[in-house]
Amino acid sequence: MREALLGYALVLPALLVFGTFIFYPFLRTAWLGLYEQPLFGGDSTWVGLEQYLDEWGSEDFRNSLFVTVKFALFTVPVGISLGVLLAVAGHQRLRGIGIYRTIFSSTVATSIAVASVLFFTLFNQQLGVLTKLLHREGETPVLDDPRLAFIAVCGVTIWQNLGLSFIVISAGLQAVPDDLLEAARVDGAGAFRRFFRVTMPLLSPTLLFAVVVGSILAFQAFAQVDLLTEGGPGDRTNVLTYAIKTTALGNPPDQGAAAAYAMALFAITLLLTVVQLRFLERRVTYER
Amino acid sequence: MARVVLDHVSKRFGSVVAVDDLSLEIADREFLVLLGPSGCGKSTALRMIAGLEDPTSGKIVIGDDVVNDREPKDRDIAMVFQSYALYPHMTVRRNIEFPLRSRKVAPEARDRLVKDAAASLGLDELLERKPAQLSGGQRQRVALARAIVREPKAFLMDEPLSNLDAKLRVQTRAELVELQRRLEATVIYVTHDQTEAMTMGHRIAIMSDGVLLQVGPPQEVYRRPANRFVAEFIGNPPMNMIAGGLVGRGDDVVVGVRPEHLHFGGPEFVSGLVIAVESLGHERHIGCRLSDGSIVIVRQATDDEQPAVDATVTLSAAAADLHAFAVATGERTSP
């Protein structure tokens, strides 16, 4: 009995923090979605699940979901592939390799807001280096171009996440035992066969982690959209998180609808993570 | 199978000399054991033969070819690692197949070779398991199967038994010797365990600090060690070393005598005080303190009369069983 009390006492601080900042807001959001906000102010009214179904079926929601999925499908594989490439390069025993490793991992010390501002400047129509490199002086600015704006937002995201991918995958590479690769060398395997038959399978737990975390980050991406394109041009970069913001704080503000969006984002992220862990894990080899 | 030759091979890591001017010829079908304490350069020597390290100088020959500039995969050797280095994500079958697949052996031939190798090591039932599902002894067999599945020019083994428990080690030792004979294989076997070296090798090459000290058949190395290091490294309990002055030989030599060559009674060679008696069942080890404070061990059969602790005893030894080593260099001075 006393032991149980002590147990509860020990969990209490964590419970308080999680309760205040995660569980309560979560339940509150779910609750908000059950009420409809009248168009011109006044008390909100109970509509039950109706609002959820309405919002999830709406054109705006489906567009945002499509943009978000496209964004994840683009940033995660490209980001991880680049991360593997850089990590393999950084794993070589060469003179001065430490300098490269520092450079490759440096973006981890950059916040997405800083990265966005940085790229905003690079894309600037008058001064931007990238604008000049892409020969777009006098044309539609990159961030206003319906096709390029999406690619630009993806690019900033990939760039910013690269440091983390590089560090995580480098750690995974270092965990591949040298003697396995040496055994493969003696067993007649060339560099490609060693990489694809030995290194990659042993790297699979790391890659699974990177895919799951990368996907969650992609579904939650917000700052780069907010700072670079504000969801535009049109709705081209209007990812779910940004749609939640514009709906909740829009004119008129619609917290009920935003709550329905937020719950959808939560459900999708959860589902995605579970599916990834279930299906990808089958193809993952853990040592011992 | 083929011979392997190390011709004045050295390896330096920065300022550290790991292997110093090593010359050694391993004959076709020979079982040679590279023996020495850890850090003596034996593993580095083996890794240079495998191509996993480049020699700083010298020539490595496998068969009739100088292989210095060849990749490990082009040297046609097989290696068994101390950790076994099995691929954890592959089944036993895939592990054994790996060297064949790397060399693009046709599937029918591959299946037959894997079957043969697995059968000869008793792995038939385990082919679909992953390494994590195997015991240490079984993993060791898989590593061996992966090595013998091809017919390489030479087998390189880096302390392959050191992760097995004592009982399994003795058993596997005998099996490895039998395997080598059956395959008529050239084997270069690295170990720090002198019992393995004595029982397995046709010849032993003893290294210390990167230098080759002596090469010869086990009995020759045991009976006529070339220097004090070899004398003390081979044999258990090790050879007793007695100051020359104590036995009328002069202070510039130490006299070595193996525990089984010291006897109680008889014409006095040296006298001492019994300080401990250890009974091992089949024999006894008796520790005696000499007048200069040093301790010698006498090995005695259990049938022999056991001296009492604290008794003063005289020890005798045949002149032929004494080895003299120069104090300054450690080199053997007796014929």
Image (spheres, coloured by chain):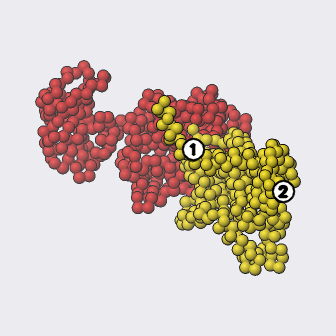
Chain colours: A yellow, B red
Which residue is labeled 1 in the image? A15
Where residue B14 sits: x, y (%)?
Answer: 44, 61
Which badge, 2 or 1, comes first in the chain's sequence?
1
The C terminus of chain A - image quarter: top right
Q: Specify the quadrant of the image occupied by residue A75.
A: bottom right
The answer to whether residue A160 is visible is yes
Type of residue at label 1?
Leu
Looking at the image, which residue is at 81% across and 43% down?
A49
Q: CA distance from mark 2 to mark 1?
A: 38 Å
> On the image, numbered disc 2 is attached to which residue?
A39
Residue B227 percent coordinates (x, y): 29, 46
Location of residue A230 by image quarter: bottom right
- Seen from the viewer's position, the closer of residues A192 and A10 is A10
> Marks 2 and 1: same chain?
yes
The chain to which mark 2 is attached is A
Q: Residue furthest front?
A: A42
- Where residue A5 sits: x, y (%)? 49, 35
Say left or right for B314 vs A165: left
Circle 1: element type: helix
Q: Is residue B257 left or right of residue A26?
A: left
Q: Residues within 10 Å of mark 1 (few under 14, many from 20)?
A: some
Point out residue A56 in the picture as x, y percentages from the top left corner: 83, 48
What residue type is disc 2 on? Leu
Q: Disc 2 or disc 1, which is closer to the eye?
A: 2
- Asked whether A242 or A260 is in front, the reply is A260
Total residue callouts: 2
Labels 2 & 1 near each other (Cβ < 8 A): no
